[in-house]
Amino acid sequence: MLAIARSELVQIFRNRLVLVTGLVMPIAISGYFVYEHERFADLGSVGYIAAIIVFTVLAFGLYATAVTTLASRRQNLFLKRLRSTAAGDAGILAGLVVPAAAIALVQVVLILVVLAAVTTTPAQLPLLAVAVLATTAMMVALALATAGVTSSPEHAQVTTLPVSLSVIAVASWVGITGTDDLARLKRLLPGGSATEMVVNAWNGGVPLAESLPLLATTWGWVAVSVALAARLFRWEPRR
């Protein structure tokens, strides 16, 4: 797995499209939210800004990059060749997505550190870490599922848009309006519970015990996505 991950990391920095979608775009959008933090804090809260940053980076920097990578490696038969090696299926997939996940997590941490420096520090840092890691797992699982219906890297630009835009829209809805109304619906939507966790972790005011059950919904989306990936994922080019 480590050899595959090292090779994939090199490929990421050689691919201009991946660099733009995975590095430049998330940093630019997140930087804008940090720069305009006073305006967006008035609209929602600092916790809302943190949630938007998390989902922007993970949607474009991790999810879209992972889907594009898997589709590309399938198209050039690299996935098929890897299956003839000693590496297992789980190790192959992990080696291909871990670099994108690691880069995205570093981006999230650095941007949130900058946000904390210009605004306020998170009230519950452990909860924030749990929320970010759970969201990362959800986006990786969604990427595996989406890769199952993506025939090429070019096709990935289309297939990734619904999920990317949806989770960011849900994060904005929950971050701005809260969960006083339509709480069950908001928490069941992909990213809704994770957004609430990030907001609670940053803003405080909610006991830790009341926020942790929100993990169940996020992990539920992980389970659903993994089940879909197991059914839809193909190791050879789709016809």
Image (cartoon, helix red, strand yellow):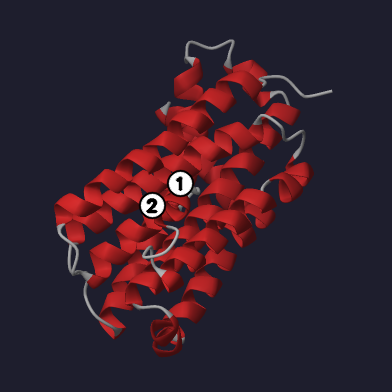
Going by the image, does 156 lie left or right of 124?
right
* Circle 1: residue type: Leu
In this orientation, which residue lies closer to the viewer: 106 or 86? 106
One can see residue 131 in this view: yes
Q: Position of residue 228 (x, y in %)?
A: 58, 26
Q: Quadrant of the C terminus?
A: top right
Going by the image, does 191 lie left or right of 13?
left
| Secondary structure type for disc 2 | helix
Q: Position of residue 89 (x, y in %)?
A: 51, 17
Query: Which corner quadrant of the image does residue 34 belong to?
Result: bottom left
Task: Kindly identify the residue that appears in the image at 44 percent across and 64 percent down.
Answer: 174
Task: Kindly identify the residue that appears in the image at 46 percent across and 21 percent down.
Answer: 90
* Label disc, if present, on residue 188 of the rendered structure: 1
* Circle 2: residue type: Ser
**Mark nearer the N terminus (2 vs 1):** 1
Going by the image, does 173 lie left or right of 106?
right
Task: Kindly identify the residue that appears in the image at 39 percent across and 59 percent down.
Answer: 195
In this orientation, which residue lies closer to the viewer: 92 or 144? 144
Location of mark 2 (residue): 193
